[in-house]
């Protein structure tokens, strides 16, 4: 039950967040709204990237996985770290180097043609909206858990506050508040781990190592090989350059900051996974063995602290959710304006800014409406990963690396990739028992790559080259 | 071995805390720089007005 102290802690957090959001100021031009004036320094690019990818899955989810399967998920999570470092080395600087580029759709439009830009824009907006719905669902669960509010009103509170500062401040407000939220959870959760290790773990280092070894061996025994392969593929490809990350690459002050921001975020993710999984491993000596995975972090802090400590955890979890949600709302709104509206209508700057703001509100409203229907955070994220990886990645990455990519290849790959990913997801729901969720990303991506190759070959024969 | 794993975990936690502090410093600099820029702009426009009058 919430106490006076917990209300005080939460009120203090809301006051500081409001102060930070107000200081981030309202965007006055579309370039402020979409790219924060292309002037972000390294620390803010890094903090914002890390705040965006550390969502409920990389916090609550990883603590639960550490509790259940020890350091097995560190190995799987490393695929994500490698992906970030590779994007930093190979893709982000190329993206930042493109001129007049606000979105991934813009990048695809410059490399292929306008039709490809529109298709990429539709996919970007849809994926951002569904990702936002997943985050809204997670935020609703946290608020509901603490205050006992009905689910729909918990979702409205989280989405409403986030949409408010994102609508007015655009990317700059999103990045500045991300930095504040990153600071909150990057300091508080590791300190919680140190506090548990030093004061609450009977047997110290030896107990921790024994628990880690037992849990990891158990995790390896109970996880089929194909599921591990699917999870590695999902972590390696699923979140690669999703629109909020691409916006941060484009908004960096220089190409060097863009590259280093991604590489640092990749290194930080390794450290973060170690901390989260260690919290789960440490919890094995404190909580009963049958504790639900998603409740390990909440129960661990709840069992060791009262009132204020639990409220601090709530603040951390709300930060985790809001920092991902604001980035998705802004990225979706910018993609809508730049890739879907602008190719059809010439928009003066002020009008583009208003369209962007309106789109933020509409995406937030759709996300809030869809949130209660999201089956679970993990399933929701896997759906987004599968669609994104197969629909966009082949066209985007090949387009950035190859000199003269062919528009037909881009359109075919995006169309076929989306269709196959959607069909695979429908199959997943019908034949839940025989298809392993994370593994569907591999065939879907394979078909999208084949479609790209076919389009490239057909395009070449058409142009007679 | 146990001590090594424990030490790695503690170092990782401290590294994460330091990252948080680094980003917090950049955040403070970013929002106070904005105030300085705004104040400078206001001062500049005030000066121009005086000259006009």
Image: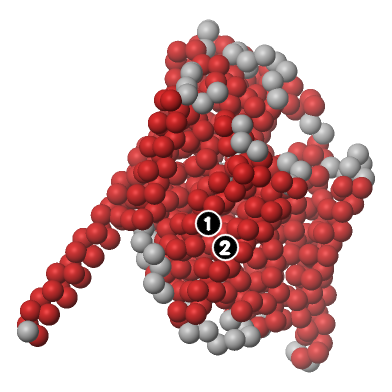
| Label 1: chain letter | A
- Residue found at the far top of this picture: A203
**Furthest residue in direction bottom, as rendered:** A464
Identity of the residue drawn at 35% across and 49% down:
A19
Residue A163 is labelled as: 1
- In contact (CB < 8 Å): disc 2 and disc 1: yes
| Chain of the residue displaying label 2 | A
CA distance for labels 2 and 1:
6 Å
Label 2: element kind: helix
Q: Secondary structure at mark 1?
A: helix
Measured as percent of width and height from the top left, residue A281 is found at 60, 22
Q: Nearer the viewer, residue A365 or A108?
A: A365
- Quarter holding the N terminus of chain B is top right
How is the structure coloured here?
secondary structure
Q: Are marks 2 and 1 on the same chain?
A: yes
Disc 1 packing (10 Å; few <14; some 14–19; many ≥20)? many
Please tell me whether residue A432 is drawn above or below residue A325 in the rendered image. Answer: above
User: Considering only vertical position in the picture, is A204 above or below A180?
Assistant: above
- Residue A58, quarter of picture: top right
């Amino acid at each position: 039950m919430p106490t006076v102290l917990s209300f005080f802690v939460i009120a203090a957090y809301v006051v500081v967040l409001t102060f930070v959001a107000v200081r981030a100021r309202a965007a006055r031009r579309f370039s402020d709204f979409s790219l924060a004036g292309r002037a972000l320094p390294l620390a803010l690019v890094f903090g914002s990237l890390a705040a965006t990818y550390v969502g409920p899955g990389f916090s609550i989810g990883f603590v639960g996985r550490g509790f259940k399967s020890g350091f097995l998920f560190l190995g799987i999570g490393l695929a994500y770290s490698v992906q970030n470092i590779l994007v930093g080395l190979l893709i982000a600087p190329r993206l930042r180097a493109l001129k007049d580029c606000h979105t991934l759709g813009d990048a695809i439009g410059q490399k292929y043609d306008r039709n490809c830009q529109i298709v990429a824009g539709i996919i970007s907006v849809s994926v951002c909206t569904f990702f936002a719905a997943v985050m809204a669902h997670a935020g609703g669960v946290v608020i509901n858990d603490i205050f006992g509010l009905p689910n729909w009103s918990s979702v409205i509170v989280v989405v409403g506050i986030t949409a408010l500062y994102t609508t007015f401040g655009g990317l700059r407000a999103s990045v500045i508040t991300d930095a504040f939220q990153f600071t909150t959870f990057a300091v508080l959760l590791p300190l919680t781990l140190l506090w548990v290790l030093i004061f609450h773990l009977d047997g110290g280092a030896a107990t921790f190592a024994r628990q880690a070894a037992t849990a990891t061996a158990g995790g390896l025994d109970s996880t089929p090989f194909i599921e591990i392969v699917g999870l590695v593929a999902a972590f390696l490809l699923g979140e690669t350059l999703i629109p909020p990350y691409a916006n941060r690459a484009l908004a960096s002050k220089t190409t060097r900051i863009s590259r280093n921001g991604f590489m640092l975020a990749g290194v930080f993710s390794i450290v973060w996974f170690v901390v989260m999984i260690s919290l789960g491993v440490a919890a094995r000596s404190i909580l009963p063995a049958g504790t639900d995975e998603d409740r390990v972090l909440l129960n661990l802090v709840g069992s060791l602290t009262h009132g204020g400590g639990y409220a601090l955890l709530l603040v951390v979890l709300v930060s985790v959710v809001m920092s991902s949600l604001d980035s998705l709302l802004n990225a979706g709104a910018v993609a809508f304006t730049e890739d879907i509206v602008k190719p059809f209508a010439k928009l003066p700057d002020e009008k583009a800014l208003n369209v962007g703001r309106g789109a933020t509100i509409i995406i937030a409203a759709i996300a809030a409406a869809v949130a209660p229907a999201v089956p679970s955070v993990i399933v929701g994220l896997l759906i987004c990963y599968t669609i994104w990886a197969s629909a966009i990645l082949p066209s985007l990455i090949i387009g950035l690396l190859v000199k003269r990519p062919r528009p037909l290849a881009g359109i075919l790959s995006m169309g076929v990739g989306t269709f196959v990913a959607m069909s695979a997801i429908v199959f997943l729901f019908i034949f839940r028992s025989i298809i392993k969720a994370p593994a569907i990303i591999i065939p879907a991506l394979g078909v999208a790559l084949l479609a790209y190759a076919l389009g490239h070959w057909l395009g070449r024969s058409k142009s007679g080259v | 071995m146990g001590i090594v794993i424990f030490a790695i975990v503690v170092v990782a936690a401290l590294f994460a805390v330091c990252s948080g502090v680094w980003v917090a410093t950049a955040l403070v600099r970013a929002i106070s720089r904005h105030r300085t820029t705004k104040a400078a702009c206001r001062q500049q426009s005030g000066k121009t007005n005086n000259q006009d009058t």
